Amino acid sequence: MSKATEQNDKLKRAIIISAVLHVILFAALIWSSFDENIEASAGGGGGSSIDAVMVDSGAVVEQYKRMQSQESSAKRSDEQRKMKEQQAAEELREKQAAEQERLKQLEKERLAAQEQKKQAEEAAKQAECFFIAKAEASGRGGSESGGRC
C-alpha cells in the first residue's frame, strides 16, 4: 500500500496546489479590478466625446424675428433711397428742360433783335436813299450815294 498512499499523497498535493493557484488567480483578478479607473462619461472604450450645446428655441425664434426685422428695415431704407434718387433725377430733368426752354427763348429774342436791327438798318438805308434821290431831284447834282441805293 505504500504505492497507493504515495499516489494518494501526490493527488492531495496536486489538489492543494491547484486550489492555492486558483485562489491566487482570483485574488489577482480582484486586485486588478480595483486598480482600473473606468470613466462613466466615456461611453465605452476609446470613443470620442461630442461637444454639444443646448439651444433655447425661444432665443432662436427671437433671433429669427430680429433678422427678419433688420432685413425689412434695410429693404425699406433701400426703397426710400431709390425713391429719393428718382425724385432728384426727375428734378434735374425738369431743371434741364426749363433751362433748355429759357435758352430757346433767349435765342428767339436774339434772332428777333437781330431781325429788328436788320429792318432798322434797311429802313435807314431806304431813308438815306430817299433823301439822296430827293436831293438829286432838287438839283444838287452828282450822285453822292455811290451806287448804294
Image (cartoon, grey):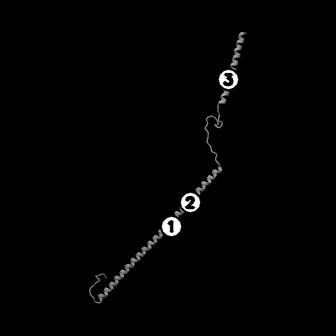
Q: Which mark is residue 77?
A: 2
Disc 3 target residue: 24
Q: Residue at x 56, y 60 (%)?
A: 77
Q: Position of residue 91 (x, y in %)?
A: 50, 67
Q: Nearer the viewer, mark 3 or mark 2?
A: 3
Residue 135 left/right relative to 7: left
Q: Where is the C terminus found, in terms of image quarters?
A: bottom left
For label 1, the crowd category at 10 Å Cα-Cα, with few meaning under 14, some 14 to 19 and many 20 or more, is few
Q: Are marks 1 and 2 in contact (CB under 8 Å)?
A: no
Disc 1 target residue: 91
Q: Is residue 85 above or below residue 113?
A: above
For label 3, the crowd category at 10 Å Cα-Cα, with few meaning under 14, some 14 to 19 and many 20 or more, is few
Q: Label 1 to label 3, Cα distance in Å?
A: 105 Å
Q: Nearer the viewer, mark 1 or mark 3?
A: 3
Secondary structure at badge 3 equals: helix
Q: Position of residue 59 (x, y in %)?
A: 64, 51
Q: Position of residue 42 (x, y in %)?
A: 63, 37
Front-lying residue, 10 or 148? 10
Mark nearer the N terminus (3 vs 2): 3
Secondary structure at badge 1 equals: helix
